[in-house]
Amino acid sequence: MPALTLSGEFVDLVPLTPEHAALTFGWRQSQRAANLNRGAATVAQQAAWIAKRPEAEYNFVIRLKDGREVGMVSVTGIDTEHSHCEPGRFLIGDEDAVRGIPAAVEAMKLVYELVFDRLGLQRIYGTVASDNTLMIKWQKFLGMKEEGRMRRHYFINGHFQDAVWMGMLVDEYRTQALPRMNSLIAAGRKAAALKPKD
């Protein structure tokens, strides 16, 4: 896919490049990434992995408007014939930087706008390791539906976990997810307006 920057009110999604290897490697080593599939073992491996991303994917770094890079997200498995794809690799790596800012929800909104509005797809899907209860709760809040489980599908953190299969249709995005995301972003806007200026 062509390099693409998606711009929101609080964050921009900018293309992930090998120059982001040290930053993203650090995020992947954090406790927040404990329930993700094992990643690269070194910064060099992370840089090589980024460089080898297929052109059929969108891989982004989440950047605040002040320039701080705080997370990552991807869109993979884009299938225009069957009209679906998989948003994933979502990770907020710098929790302190996004405190009080609706960075996570706006990043997902930008991804959903890309998938449903620009690409015109009908469905998104993905799996979450069953121990990752906060991500499952977050995805359900944003409108994803649990569609099934693949039992003992992942071996993460020294034990087998189910893969929780989740999905959302375009009409569910428009009627459920988008209003929720807009509400959270509006609340963030209001909070930002009330915050004292330095």
Image (cartoon, rainbow, N blue to C red):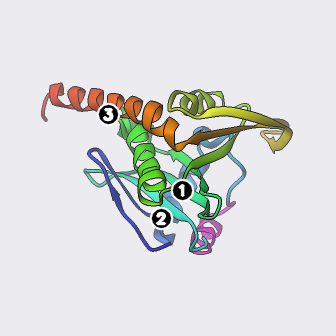
Where 63 falls versus 129 (above or below)?
Answer: below
Looking at the rendering, in which quadrant would you find the C terminus? Answer: top left
Q: Position of residue 168 (x, y in %)?
A: 58, 40
Q: Amino acid at mark 1?
A: Ser
Residue receiving disc 2: 16
In front of the other: 107 or 177: 177
Residue receiving disc 1: 74
Q: Amino acid at mark 3?
A: Ile
Q: CA distance from mark 3 to mark 2?
A: 24 Å
Q: Which mark is residue 185?
A: 3
**Which comes before the other along the chain, label 1 or label 2?**
2
**Main SS category, magenta section:** helix
In front of the other: 42 or 102: 102
In front of the other: 38 or 30: 38
**Count of residue discs:** 3
Quadrant of residue 190 within the rendered picture? top left
Q: Which residues are magenta?
A: 40-52
Q: Which mark is residue 53?
A: none
On the picture, is 111 further left or further right than 163? Answer: left
Q: Secondary structure at mark 3?
A: helix
Residue at x 63% of width, y 64% of height? 81
> Crowding near pointer 2: few (<14 within 10 Å), some, many (20+)?
many
**Which comes before the other along the chain, label 3 or label 2?**
2
**Which comes before the other along the chain, label 1 or label 3?**
1
